Amino acid sequence: MRLAPIVAVALLAAAPAAAQLGAATQSPPPEGVAEGQGAANPKGHYAALDALPDWGGIWFVMAGPPGSAPAATPKLKGEYLARREAFVAEVRANDGVTRRDRSYCSPPGLPRIMRLAQYPYEFIFAPGRVTINQEAWMQTRTIWTDGRAHEEDPDPGFMGDSIGHWEGDTLVVDTIGISDALEMDTGWPHSDQFRLIERIHLDPSNPDVLVNEMRMEDPEALAEPYEVTTRYRRDRYGKLFEFQCSENDRNPVDEDGNTQFD
Amino acid sequence: MKRLLLLSAALAALPIPAVVPAIAWAHHSYAMFDMNKTVVLDASVTRFKWQNPHAFIEVDVTVKGGTEHWAIEMTAPNNLVQEGWKRTSLKPGDKVRIWVHPLRTGARGGSYAGIRLPDGSTLGDVS
């Protein structure tokens, strides 16, 4: 209570900012979307969603068939190749164990979050957008399908800025703005120019399999685009479980980057 | 599920992770476990944690001269459901036999492979 007058003075001093507290932010429509249109104005556009393909249920990443050849690896170049080689040398020297520079409660971001073995996904269609809920870390990914352009300078993040459109029954997604602190896969670094293009569709020979043809481009880190296909199998009536990592973090990372086991 | 774990085991055994796994690692790599080795524990359950990112079983194992406490990591509950597990499958005091891939460090912990429940039924890989 003794602090209250000081807080009041501080708020008065910051009047321009404080005046906005509690007021609804008035954002302009995104680039490429007219006032009154787009994902923010879904009313009247729900019936059209029925034309989209049936992606109901939840989806688990499928392992390749036993004995299948390992997927091709990214062709890195320059300093990114050197970083890769240093990583491999260190893991080799460390008995196959990879060091971590962050908590396991920190999610991997794109593209790895779309390729996790244990945790399923669900796809929610709404006018002007597709939402992907991910059991892993309870992550949410938004793909804007309302015709907007990429943000001019998106804040680098775990999910980046995803713009999509439907080509028939295939959702085509273009993602930029993925943080260069993340990796294509463990020990495979990329630059801030990294770009992910996904073509997501049901398998024509099995409608309970969803196919994600992923293409990764990076003029700084990759000598050529890297392509890999991820498949998911449907669990029609399954549901996502809660994932509150800090409630059950049994694998803290010590200051040397070694994974502990409680 | 079993196939996923075995795949992880094969990859963990590679001296050099020169290939991108067909699927990315799950929550963490299995390199901390000796996936080629299985130990069998006759144990008493002290705790069963049914929660992401991994379910856990904690047990006491009677050994010569005392008791060892083991922490056994499982996969995610959503995978375990498909193997027949549920939140109420275990409770403290249950006497079970557990098949475990032990930690390489020798500490009393490991990765779950299979279990024989008090009613004699089994889940997972108990061979």
Image (tube, coloured by chain):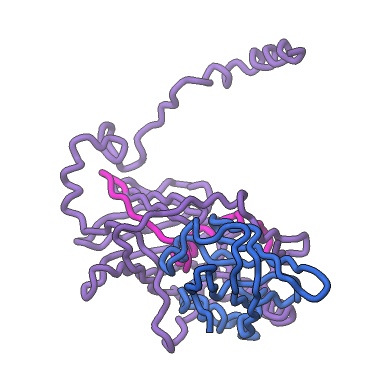
Secondary structure character of the magenta stretch overall: loop
Task: Give the colour chain A carries in the figure.
Answer: purple
The image quarter containing residue A214 is bottom left
Q: Position of residue B107 (x, y in %)?
A: 75, 72
**Extreme top residue here?**
A5
- Residue shown at 50%/69% (left/top)? B119
**Extreme front residue here?**
B119
Along the horizontal axis of the image, is B75 left or right of A133?
right
Along the viewing direction, whichever of A8 and B43 lies nearer the viewer: B43
Along the viewing direction, whichever of B96 and B56 lies nearer the viewer: B96
Q: Indicate whether A93 appears above or below A103.
A: below
Region in magenta: A100-129
- Residue shown at 49%/67% (left/top)? A218
Q: Position of residue A228 (x, y in %)?
A: 41, 74
Q: Magenta stretch containing residue A191, yes or no? A: no
Along the viewing direction, whichever of A103 and A245 lies nearer the viewer: A245
The answer to whether residue A181 shows anywhere in this view is yes
Q: Indicate whether B26 appears above or below A237.
A: below
Q: Magenta stretch containing residue A121, yes or no? A: yes
Q: Position of residue B105 (x, y in %)?
A: 75, 75
Along the horizontal axis of the image, is A3 left or right of A44?
right
Q: Position of residue A106 (x, y in %)?
A: 59, 55
Along the viewing direction, whichever of B29 and A125 lies nearer the viewer: B29
Q: Indicate whether A162 appears above or below A186.
A: above
Along the horizontal axis of the image, is A218 left or right of B58?
left
Along the horizontal axis of the image, is A71 left or right of A48?
right
Placement of the N terminus of chain A among the 4 image quadrants: top right
The answer to whether residue A82 shows anywhere in this view is no
- Residue shown at 62%/76% (left/top)? B100
- Residue shown at 77%/60% (left/top)? A255
Task: Give the colour chain B carries in the figure.
Answer: blue
